[in-house]
Image (cartoon, rainbow, N blue to C red):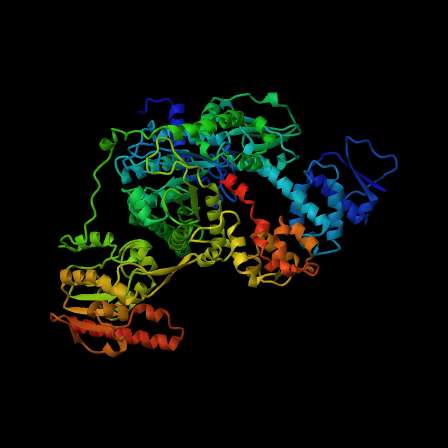
Amino acid sequence: MSGKPILEKLSILADAAKYDASCASSGTVKRDSTGTKGIGSTGGMGICHSYAPDGRCISLLKILLTNFCIYDCRFCINRASSNVPRARFNPQEVVRLTLDFYKRNYIEGLFLSSGIIRSEDYTMEQLVEVARILREEHRFGGYIHLKTIAGAAPELIARAGLYADRLSTNVELPTEAGLQSFAPEKKPETIRKTMASVRVGADDAIEAAKGRLLKKAKPPRFAPAGQSTQMIIGADASRDDDILATATNLYSGYHLRRVYYSAYSPIPDASSDLPPVRPPLMREHRLYQADWLLRFYGFQRAEIMEGASGGMLDLSIDPKLAWALMRRDIFPVDINRAPRELLLRVPGLGTRAVDRIVAVRRTGKLRIGDLAKLTASVKKLLPFIHTPDWRPGPLTDSASLRARFAPPAEQLSLAL
Amino acid sequence: MREVVLARPGDFAEWRDAARGLLAGGVAPEDVSWRGAEEGASLFGDDAPSASGAAVSLPRELLAMADRVICHSDANVPARLYRIVWRALRDRQLLARRSDPDIDWLSKTDKAIRRDIHKMHAFVRFRRLGEDAGRERFAAWFEPDHRILRLTAPFFRRRFYGMDWAIVTPNARAIWHDETLTYGAGGTKDEVPDSDVVEDQWRTYYGAIFNPARVKIAAMRAEMPKKYWKNLPEAQDIAPMLAGAAARVERMRATAVSLANPQTDKWRTSMPEALALTDDIDTLDDLARAVGGCTRCPLHCNATQGVVGEGPAAARVMLVGEQPGDREDLEGRPFVGPAGQVLNEALEEAELDRQRLFLTNAVKHFKFEPRGKRRLHQNPTTGEIDICRWWLDKERALVQPELIVTLGASALRGVTGKSMSVTSMRGAVHELAGGTRLVATIHPSFLLRLPDRARAAEERAAFVADLAHVRELAA
């Protein structure tokens, strides 16, 4: 199989990798090539070097080592029973591609995943080997994201953490029942155990750093950009409530940096029991918004679900607005006096706008005109706030408030 | 009217020196006219006072912003910056007044510069020139909106230390060679090669990573505006990719689901089957495997793994706790978290060797409530304890301890099947059916929750005494 020309392999193995949504290159340690005189730097916010017409950022060279796979997960383009063309890179070819792309400033680094060949341990070893060659033989300082193969030995995961900035293990489907029916070889417990060993590795590295005697001796870092996971949305019957419950558990148990929600999108040579529909992009978007409310806005899952019906988020308005419409007793809030936690709950105010408001109101009373300079959407705020020169009066409680924000019905069907 | 001529547009030092001079001379912003060298000097202007070296103290944040904003291509920037500096010296709160028109302008302009910098970091495309004494050489042509080369070149130096490179822009160039960064005059596009062999691979990658089922052109153009496309090798493929997208999706949908790949069976390896609960469990290893697949109650859904007991199969003393905690759940071993720490210290004081004890829990899965980044321990219900008793009984049957020590009320329930208070059972030796002796004491996590230090010390001593009693009984 290694006889295929490199362009053909690249095409097959990038095509096979694109269903992994993550392309983040942020949140890792500051590193540059001045000390090593090699190539590569990281730190601060990630950089998106290009965008594909699907609107997704291209930050990393996202490829599979191989798309041969002994598993038969029905939602996956690479499942054993699929008839897609197969290819396999050897570790040196991936290293070459990564360096060639990196030196031309196409990418921030590598996101390497793989189908399972021979065994979980063998596959993981191959991934770790690519990262090792890049770091040790080429002094590569760019970003490396490795997929951890669920079920691989903890020692291999520990080695992966030494080379990689980020590790990720996909839970694939939000519920255990979904996983059992769509990915019979994957065991939820194995996936969770793998995430647990990543967290233990990270916790131990932090403890080791605290306990060291010589402050100058830098302890080895363990996956400084943390771990993430991905769930496929819309392939099975899980409700948004289940999805957010799973996400909450994963955030608390394994300290994930991100949970990615990936709308199930039809794949070539699909299995017959999957919906041949357009990917539910709006649902995916609402889940991301809800996820942000959980992590940065102090919302509990139960609160978010107050604005939902039947366990599903409202598709036509965002989840914070949906919640606020159910909890109008709290509004309007006084922009000049409300505590930060309450400002965060005002529809239309993001964390940045809230920080600005809190900083600026120390220098004087804010009026509606001032708000326009601090946030993008004053119109959206109006029913929920009051200032010295604005009171919403009956607007806050008016029956037609939802209609003010929700797009007309026919537009909605287009958006889907 | 004072007149300041800036010979090097975008040069912060030149503007700063001029501004210092003006501030030292007390020249108000409305009395200064700023112009570039190429514009003819005004007929009526006086020369600005030269920098007198008078120290001016300004907020660090304002200086950092001025350093960036001066690169803006708008000719009015030097004048407006001077006015802000002038005002900032008289109003220490000025920068915090985000709704002030000058500060609003400053932050918007700064944002535009930072975006330009960020896009330059992203969209510069190097092309390979060749190799020189083992060092690869690259060059890139880039057209930023503003004069930001000096703000971006250090980024490229940190990133591409190990290769030689040049970035050419219309009004300046940066060259990294011999581990030295130098700047020079602007240039033209034809100084840089018009292709690179790796570009074919990059374009192949760009085409393959695109998902035709989720076209979102607006999202792409918002982040990668069309003005950059002419210098991005991959951008020439956008139009043909979009033109073919709908057809590709249609083909995917229309293709009848094909037969399974006949090679499937060759690749697949046989998976070891998990032991069914009813299978014979003859050893502790069998038991561990079976607990791994336990779905007798819903606790397994959220916990990482079932945690079975640990210790010699012939241990004479068995310690039973409540359930695994956060750390135990992650590691898959009992008593390795904070409560385990307390237990270890108490065992040591009581001169009991942990290696010779069998440690386990009444409930094998961790029950918790997720709260942000933490999992808060929740007590198992009697129902959950009773369901899990099946496993504890198996462990007792396999280890056959002479003495069981229950830590806390849940353990007592797990061992006896009855709800009893620890206080009423504590301090005596009880006999269980079959002749096994039972000693009840508190759970070590109880000691962690006592806020009063005197009380905690007292309780801890009592706990150690209980364990010492266990040592005597087991002797």
Residue at the extreme left: B434
Front-lying residue, B52 or B293: B293
Front-lying residue, A195 or A311: A311
Is residue A124 visible in the rendered image? The answer is yes
Q: Is residue B232 left or right of residue A132?
A: right
Q: Using the image, determine if residue B419 lies above or below residue A231.
A: below
Q: Quadrant of residue A94?
A: top left
Q: Quadrant of residue A185?
A: top left
Residue B410, given in percent of the width and then of the height, sits at: 27, 68
Which residue is located at x 38 percent, y 73 percent? B450
Quarter of the rendering occupied by the N terminus of chain A: top left
Residue A393, given in percent of the width and then of the height, sits at: 65, 61
Residue at the extreme right: B44
Which residue is located at x 33 percent, y 28 percent? A86
Residue A174, given in percent of the width and then of the height, sits at: 37, 48
Residue B86, given in percent of the width and then of the height, sits at: 76, 50
Which residue is located at x 60 percent, y 38 percent? B117
Q: Using the image, determine if residue A255 lies above or below residue A164.
A: below
